[in-house]
Amino acid sequence: MANGDLSLDLSASDVMSFTGWPDPMVNDYISRGADYMLTGDGDPNTLNIPANRTRQYFDRAGSKLYVNPVIGARAGWVAV
């Protein structure tokens, strides 16, 4: 489960192996599938987290909020 909700938590490699889609299409699919703020333990740039439609990520370990202006981007997260 992702972020304590009931959604299916698929990695990009899972989606790619199921569909055969190229990276940009997989990233877009994953980013559109989630409307909740992403959370995790660590810097999203280091963890290679794709930005979803909220474009927000909360680092629980460091208590930092990050934003990313580009949906699907795995780099470019900025702490605010």
Image: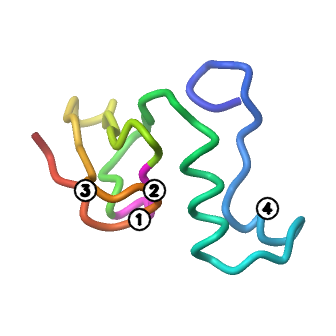
Identify the amino acid type marked 4.
Answer: Asp
Q: Is residue 72 above or below residue 61?
A: below
Asked if disc 1 and disc 3 are in contact, CB closer than 8 Å, the reply is no
Q: Residue at x 39, y 40 (%)?
A: 41
Instruction: Give coordinates of residue 71: x percent, y percent.
Output: 41, 55
- Residue 50 in the magenta stretch? The answer is yes
Where residue 21 sits, quadrant-wise, is bottom right
Asked if disc 2 and disc 1 are in contact, CB closer than 8 Å, the reply is yes
Asked if disc 3 and disc 2 are in contact, CB closer than 8 Å, the reply is yes
**Residue ID for mark 3:** 77
Q: CA distance from mark 2 to mark 1?
A: 5 Å
- Residue 21 in the magenta stretch? The answer is no
Q: Residue at x 25, y 56 (%)?
A: 77
Q: Secondary structure at mark 2?
A: loop
**Residue ID for mark 2:** 49
Sequence-first disc among 4 and 3: 4
Q: Secondary structure at mark 1?
A: loop
Q: Is residue 69 above or below residue 60?
A: below
Asked if disc 2 and disc 4 are in contact, CB closer than 8 Å, the reply is no
Magenta-tinted stretch: 46-51
Sequence-first disc among 1 and 4: 4
Instruction: Give coordinates of residue 38: x percent, y percent.
Output: 44, 36
Q: Residue at x 58, y 36 (%)?
A: 34
Q: CA distance from mark 4 to mark 3?
A: 23 Å
**Residue ID for mark 4:** 14
Location of the N terminus by quadrant is top right
Q: Secondary structure at mark 4?
A: helix
